[in-house]
Image: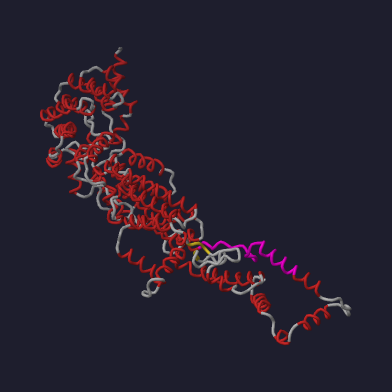
Amino acid sequence: MSHREIALAIAVLGALAFCTDAGAQSLDLITNANLKAYTESELAGGAPSIPVTSRALYREALQLLREGKKEEAVQKLELSANITGDYAAPLFTLARIKILSASPDFLPYFIDGCTRTALSYPSQAVFAANAAAFLIFAVVGALLATLVALLVKYWQLIDHKIVEAFANRFTFPPARWIIGIICVALVFMRLGFALYIAILLVALWSFMSRREKGAVLALVILLSAASFAARSSNTLAPAIDPRSVTNRLALVNRRGADEGSIARIRAIEGKGYQADRNFALGTMMYRIGRYPDAQGYLLESVSLANRFAPAFVNLGNVYFMQGDYDKALSGYQSAVELDSASAVANYNIGQAYIKKMLFAQSGEWLERANMLGIDAFRSAHPAIGLRNPPVYESGFDPGELRSIAYIEGGARRGILISEMLQPYVLFPFQWLWLLFAASLCAAMILARKLPEAWHVERCENCGGATCSACEDAQTGIRLCRDCADVIKDLGSVKVMEALLRTRRLRVASVRQRSHRRRTLFFPGASHLYYGRTAAGVALSLVGAGAVAILVWRGAYFKDPGAMNLAQPLWKMLFPLGALCAAYIASFRVKAPQEPRNYRVFPPEMRLQERGIAKEQEQGKAAAEPWVDPGPSGPTAVRAKSVADKTPEQKGQPGREEALVGGIEKGSKWH
């Protein structure tokens, strides 16, 4: 190479090798002396990220925003985001500030915040645990609310036969109280959501329509699937427990080296974690400059797990800091053989070649590091820009932490989701699918094998409950006892239909007035009562989800590395708004308009009555002798009709004529 090319290569290599992260900022913005001293000690201990300082700055920024000091708050938020690589809250807050300022710059902050949330293992685990808990609680609440709404809908049918059977045997308490006493007793027994759902499934299955059965079955299948897979939630438990092996090993990614961190890692036991434990200890020793100890731990780590590339990278760093660049290159090359996409290993090889004054080889490896994303590595570990070390070290990537958590979670005796739901369900959640399967089988068998005498159906006129012991089917339709009493001893189809129609309207009016107080206990109950099953189940899910957010204030499982922050107001207003909207939708639902059916009885009954009347008229005409017709017209017809009546009949109309006349005068439907 010519002297000009060599000079140009050295300039390019210098720019690449010693550049700092553009996002790094001065620590002078940290006004709290104790926090600044802690941050400096973490940087001195080689911390790749400083989440404690980041969260403290975020709290200060929120306070400044409340005081109206927007510019100072933005500076704090930017520093908070730039000294940690997995904390997304400052970025989302910056995006919100930009949106409220009508600035298009919100998008980079928002995208960066989503990226941090998606790529950070602690964020992934905490989000997944909360999402699973939220969805399970929402489905449990929606299923229970749906079944209670269906219980209200079919209350008459269930109550009818139980009351009849009780009244035949006992006189006290009053029969009409018995079903209420049973329900109150079940509530005070506190059996838990699981057993209540199972009992309601068995009691209601034979009464539900096909669409209602499908909706209930869909919710039951969702819960059963979650129950069957409940043990897999244990893989998320280590990320939530600050004392877990996974969190103690993850200190390598979140903390600088100090005696406390080293002691917590050294206390890890178990053969399954020996390679990771030695890697973490070796990395911590390297950060505080105890290179012989670091070399021993890292050599032991690569001997136990010879496929773990980060251990070879950090072992190469130990040799690099001791001036043995050939052994350093050997360690980095081993890491590249295991993981050719490692930007850190390629970057460190370039740095080692610079120390050996081999600039051409160094340029190739540094260019490759740029292509593999060394800038992304700096962004994920922003504290590196504040320290500017000659070579970069590797920690546990999210995939490795997930593997450690999987091993640790598999050895866990309890089940995370079951422990969370136990106070509400009062039944082992992992066996909930067996309880639901047994209750559905019992419900189907009971619906088929139930004696005919216990089958309860609806009156075809008023919709009330009736059974084989009290129904009246002599008119061709199923009538309850009250409807049958209305048309007792009547022979005119027209009169009977008018009376039944009047009773049906009266019953429907009373039922419509009373449904509000019975179905507004939870969103969606009114829709289920009126047969709008899909909308009712959807509103029940919205209501249960809003209640879950309000009860847990948005998160059940907390990030163990997070500091206590004031709950934003919108996190309470949003679920309250959703709950109110669901209640308004339930309140505004209207009863479906029934068709104006003036004819209740089957057509053949009406035709039969007409045939009988016609035959009677023909027989009467044949029996009467012929007489002179005399004068004709309406006056003669009325005179003949009056003349044919007895003296008693002339003074009062017949019963059927009076009923028809009264109904026609008082009915609004005519």
Q: Pick the residue in front: 562 or 356.
A: 562
Q: Number of callouts in the render? A: 0
**Quadrant of the image for the C terminus?**
bottom right
Q: Looking at the rendering, which quadrant does residue 6 occupy? A: top left
Q: Can see residue 667? A: yes
> Image check: 572 left or right of 529?
left
Give residue 644's position: percent from left, percent from top. 77, 82
Residue at 49 percent of width and 64 percent of height: 467
Q: Can see residue 561? A: no
Assess whether residue 597 is covered by the magenta stretch.
yes
Give residue 559's position: percent from left, percent from top. 26, 47
Q: Residue placed farthest to the top in the image?
A: 1
Assess whether residue 348 is covered by the magenta stretch.
no
Q: Pick the residue in front: 527 or 550.
A: 527
In the rendered image, the vertical position of residue 384 relative to residue 556, given as above or below: above
Q: Pick the residue in front: 315 or 401.
A: 401
Give residue 207's position: percent from left, percent from top. 46, 58
Residue at 64 percent of width and 62 percent of height: 602
- What colour scheme was applied to this rendering of the protein? secondary structure
Highlighted magenta segment, given as a residue range: 588-615
Q: Looking at the rendering, which quadrant does residue 295 occupy? A: top left
In the rendered image, the vertical position of residue 118 relative to residue 375, given as above or below: below
> Image check: 351 left or right of 201?
left
> Image check: 159 left or right of 360?
right
In the rendered image, the vertical position of residue 392 relative to residue 611, given as above or below: above
In the rendered image, the vertical position of residue 569 relative to residue 374, given as above or below: below
**Quadrant of the image for the N terminus?**
top left
Give residue 38's position: percent from left, percent from top. 18, 45
